[in-house]
Amino acid sequence: MDPAETLALLQRIPLFAEFTLDELKTFLELTDTVRFTAGSYVVRQDEAGDCMFVILDGKARVRHRRKNQEFDLAVLGEGDFLGELALVDEGPRMADVLAETECVCLKASQAVFRVLAGVQPAAALKFFVAVARVVVTRMRKTNARYIDSLFLVGRNRALMRDLIND
């Protein structure tokens, strides 16, 4: 994908909807394009993170491991992003992300955003606000699922009590 194609793609991604053309060009100049072959890890659970990725092409699967079990959490595609928490802290990654197909991603480190904030402060602010909107939407969905599971557990407990008392 050449820079002109990448720029045209970024203009279609909601994460960059409020960017001017100049801001997009600057962002693109600061980031690295990384290719992942199908089956390879984009990030690994429990490793420290210092960057995020925006998927330009391909699909990636988000998978959490606990003990001897694996749970698929999401499938991400063009325009989706991952690893955004690493821009705030360098804590451990919360899940594995594996390329399902060949993936082309933009890699943006904490350093990229420090530079972006210096040369295009409005772009840095727009980016973090757009990321925050997506993160909040994800949190709302997760909270709704969690609340639904509490009601399901409560209903199952009541059913078990009824069965035992009968």
Image (spheres, rainbow, N blue to C red):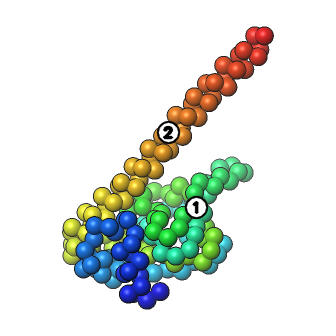
Residue 44 lies, in percent from the top left, at 57, 64
According to the picture, the residue beneath numbered tag 2 turns out to be 144
Q: Nearer the viewer, residue 76 or 92?
A: 76
Q: Is residue 43 at least partly visible in the picture?
A: no
Left or right placement of residue 101 versus residue 141 in this view: right
Tell me: 143 left or right of 156.
left
Q: What x and y, as percent, mark residue 144? A: 49, 39
Question: Is 56 left or right of 40, judged from the image as shown?
Answer: left
Identify the residue shown where x is 53% and y is 67%: 77
Q: Quadrant of residue 121?
A: bottom left
Q: Residues within 10 Å of mark 1 (few under 14, many from 20)?
A: some
Considering depth in this image, is 40 or 60 the residue closer to the camera? 60
Image point (54%, 80%), residue name = 35
Q: Secondary structure at mark 1?
A: strand
Point 41% across, 53% down: residue: 135
x, y percent for residue 64: 61, 54
Image quarter of the C terminus = top right
Residue 32 in the image: state x and y as whole percent: 42, 80
How packed mark 2 is, by other alpha carbons closer than 10 Å (few <14, some 14-19, many 20 or more), is few
Q: Amino acid at mark 1?
A: Val
Between disc 2 and disc 1, whose residue precedes? Answer: 1
Looking at the image, which residue is at 43% across and 89% down? 2
The image quadrant that residue 20 belongs to is: bottom left
Given contact means CB atoms under 8 Å apart, are the residues at marks 2 and 1 in contact?
no
Q: Nearer the viewer, residue 8 or 54?
A: 8
Q: Is residue 79 visible?
A: yes
Label 2 is placed on what type of residue? Answer: Ala
Say whether residue 14 is left or right of residue 70: left
Q: How many marks?
A: 2
Q: Which residue is mark 1?
A: 75
